Amino acid sequence: MLELKYEYFTNTWPGRIKLAELVLGLLCMMCAAPAYYDTQHWFLLVVVVAFLGTIFFSLYYLCLAEPLNKLAVNWVMAEFWFTAGSTFFYFTAFLAQLVDFAPFANEDYQYWIDAQITAGVFGLLNDIMYGIGSY
């Protein structure tokens, strides 16, 4: 029987940071999709992999800690390295997104270009959240 331990997300800072990472990741995906260019593909790859990993570690703290602790894996160290790697890859992804789309101006597709720039800004904010999470 699994027990839900939702107190982790309401009473601790790491839980709140994970929730912020998930919300910002969703906003990144909503603004950047669908991908047409290489930088968008890279950005969405980083966002989706980081989002899925964050969901896994959120589920770990929510209900899977006891069953998974039976394995010989240091989950705290795995989470640290995942978060540190996500911080680095988010940095490369949001930087590529902003560098590629910030100088564009096109009257017909300006709404799409603005959405890509917004996705890059949300990526910057999520990079900060992952940096705080790895600290």
Image: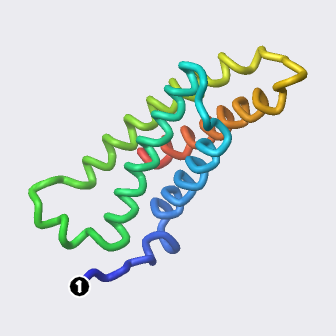
Is 96 placed above or below 111 here? above
Q: In which quarter of the image is residue 124?
A: top right
Left or right? Give the position of 32 relative to 12.
right
* Residue lying at 46% horizontally and 33% vertically, measured from the top left: 45
Name above or below for residue 91 compared with residue 50. Answer: above
Image quadrant containing the N terminus: bottom left
Q: Where is residue 129 in the image (x, y as percent from the top left)?
A: 54, 46
Q: Nearer the viewer, residue 55 or 126?
A: 55
Measured as percent of width and height from the top left, residue 71 is found at 11, 60
Is the C terminus in the top left, top right, bottom left or bottom right quadrant? Answer: top left
Residue 37: x %, y % from top left? 59, 20
Residue kind at label 1, given as amino acid type? Met
Q: Which residue is drawn at 31% across and 82% down?
A: 3
Please give the residue where the numbered disc 1 appears in the rendered image: 1
State left or right for residue 8 relative to residue 38: left
Q: Position of residue 28 (x, y in %)?
A: 61, 42
Would residue 41 be found to the left or right of residue 50 on screen?
A: right
Name the residue at 56% across, 47% down.
25
Seen in the picture, residue 113 relative to 75 is either above or below; the reply is above
For image coordinates 35% across by 57% down, the residue present is 56
Residue 15 vs residue 26: left or right?
Answer: left
Colouring method of the image: rainbow
> Which SS class for mark 1?
loop
How many numbered marks are there?
1
Give neighbour class at mark 1: few <14, some 14-19, many 20+ (Cα, 10 Å). few
